[in-house]
Amino acid sequence: MLNNVLLYFIIYSFLGWCLESVYKTILDKHFVNSGFLYGPCCPIYGFGAIIMIIVFGALPKNIFIIFFISMIFLTIWEYIVGFILEKIFKTKYWDYSNIKFNINGRVCLKNSIYWGILGVIFIFIIHPVIGNLVNILPASVIFHLNVVLYIIFITDMIITVNRILFIDDKIEEVYQIGEKIKEKISELKQSEGLEKVSVQNILEKLNDLKQEQANLKTKLYKQINRLKGAFPTMHMSEKISKFIEQKIDLKGKRNKKDEEE
């Protein structure tokens, strides 16, 4: 039974990712890798599905009961997940503040109704099909499948969390490299009378620092843009916002310079 539940979690996390990615891809008219993780997995849907399987296992299959309980339980779950993510990562990944009948921007009535509808579809259509398919599989196959899938899932979780937790530190590293670049430029300005070899060494170190900073910036921009694509209403930390604004300002200055030329 536990093996089945573990497999359900992965399956529904993947199906949730498909649902969100398709929806956002249609809206944005380009592919969007939705969700918090790098891989095709939205754990909020996986946990939500498990909650529903457990709760509705002991309840009568009444469409109205399922709708309202799905709406309530999944709305509470969405609120809890949003709150936890904000506290851990100092970032608000979704914000419904501009939608009527919201609570702290973390949940809203419109989404709650969607959760209710999704709950009905899940209990009456999706889970019976998935449940029958999983029950066909031998226990040994489910066990080994879980081992492989959870190794991938946990690895993705560790990499994602590690990178997001240290975004601010990486931005600080970019600024520190910038200070070192300024020092090398200052050395160059005062290099009159130095041997050619010494000047060359300064230039090489300067170029290395510029390349290191450019590589780090590129990685950070890709990471931040991926999160912005997955969570369009995301409220970033002050340091990340400032970092992105600097890039926009730099682009604006370059465009203006190009026009003048």
Image (cartoon, grey):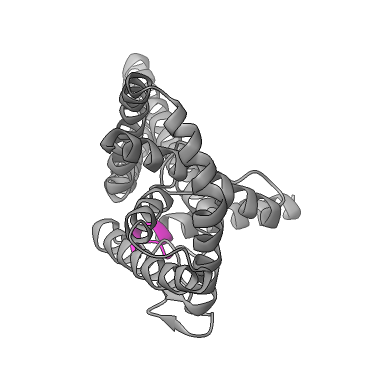
Outermost residue to the front: 60
Position of residue 89 in the picture relative to residue 223 (left or right) = left
- Picture residue at 47% right of the left edge, 79% below the top: 97
* Magenta region: 235-241
Look at the image and tell me whether residue 116 can be seen.
yes
Residue 171 lies, with reference to residue 98, above or below; the image says: above
- Picture residue at 33% right of the left edge, 46% below the top: 164
Position of residue 205 in the picture relative to residue 95 (left or right) = left
Residue 237 among magenta residues: yes
* Residue 30 percent location from the top left of the image: 69, 46
* Residue 248 percent location from the top left of the image: 55, 56
Residue 260 among magenta residues: no
Q: Nearer the viewer, residue 207 or 191?
A: 207
Outermost residue to the top: 197
Residue 90 quadrant: bottom left
Look at the image and tell me whether residue 186 can be seen.
no
- Picture residue at 70% right of the left edge, 53% below the top: 26
Number of marks present in the image shown: 0
Instruction: Locate the N terminus and report the quarter of the image it occupies.
Output: top left
